[in-house]
Amino acid sequence: MKNKKKLSPVIQFALTVLLIALVYVIIQLMMNAKIINRYYSGILISICINVILVVSLNITTGFLGQLTLGHAGFMAIGAYVAAFLTKEVFSIAGPIDFILATLIAGGVAMVFGVIICLPTLRLKGDYLAIITLACGEVIKNILLNLDITGGASGYIGIPRYTNFAFAYIFAIITVYATYALIKSRFGRVVMAVRDNEIAAESSGVNINRVKMLAFVFAAFFAGVAGSLYAHYIGILEPKIFDFDKSIEILVMVVLGGMGSIKGSVIAAVVLTVLPEMLRGADNLRMLIYALSLIIIMLFKYSPTLSSFINRFRRKEKVS
């Protein structure tokens, strides 16, 4: 057996930062050279927004093991709060008020996360999914009937501050913060609660506190994603943040793997790009998209394929 020297954590971190910076520089240079036009730039921004949504949902659904279907509701809160602040409240034009509004929007989403989480702490499984789904629909319908949000007509005139740089930086922050959280002592407690709540509670873990913190952490980044979305599109309609949006995010989490940050990023990229690739299929677009998801899921969770991959990994370790 060959001895392989592992790189030190400091070197690994430095290489990761270098790779992240290199990817950003290359994409930015391609944009400046018009190799990446506005259409593809929009796809890249959408990828970053979906990465934030999927990675943050994976905290509660994957690492904590709680099935929640109200993530689009927190995104809606973040989107409307940030849009209102930049349009009606702040007088400083440019990126300063956008960043401040985004952070405040994330904070407001956290507050709503606490409000929704408190009555659902003892629920799990299908019951939790139904309650969070209902809360998401309540948020959508409240926004639909408020004059201050424009109602069904939509909230228009939002400054379009979101560009690739902002979206990329916030996506990297989300991934790093989630990775740091999961690798910390609190992250190990979160996974212990997922594996066995009774055993974790008997060990002195405050399960309600753990669920609350994980829930509000996810809600904060959903609000950030909502702010980025609002300032990219320039108009908000409540129907965008419906049940289908929450299911779309959940599908990305499941496809990438429950409790896998790397898988969440890959799934967000694939399922953002795939619908754009199928635009030329016209009426068959959604059918092909659905069939593609089914094939990918069958391929990913095939027992035969899994055993083959595990056998290949074992051979690789032996060599």
Image: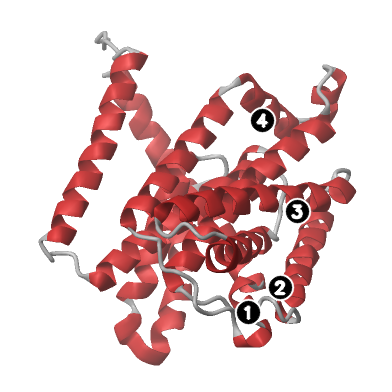
Between the C-alphas of marks 4 and 2, the distance is 31 Å
Q: Residue furthest left?
A: 33
Between the C-alphas of marks 1 and 4, the distance is 34 Å
Crowding near the residue tagged with mark 4, few <14, some 14–19, many ≥20 C-alpha atoms within 10 Å: some
User: Label 4's element?
Assistant: helix
- Mark 4 vs mark 2: which is more N-terminal? 2
Question: Residue drawn 38% across and 33% down?
Answer: 311
Between the C-alphas of marks 3 and 4, the distance is 24 Å
In which quadrant will I find the C terminus?
Answer: top left
The answer to whether 268 appears left or right of 2 in the picture is right
Q: Amino acid at mark 4?
A: Met
Q: Nearer the viewer, residue 190 or 299?
A: 190
Between the C-alphas of marks 1 and 2, the distance is 7 Å
- Mark 1 vs mark 4: which is more N-terminal? 4
Residue bearing the label numbered 1: 239
Q: Amino acid at mark 2?
A: Lys
Q: Quadrant of residue 205?
A: top right
| Residues at marks 1 and 2 touching, judged by CB atoms closer than 8 Å | yes
Between the C-alphas of marks 2 and 3, the distance is 13 Å
Residue bearing the label numbered 2: 140
Q: Nearer the viewer, residue 109 or 83?
A: 83
Residue bearing the label numbered 3: 112
User: Label 2's element?
Assistant: helix
Above/below status of 223 relative to 18: below
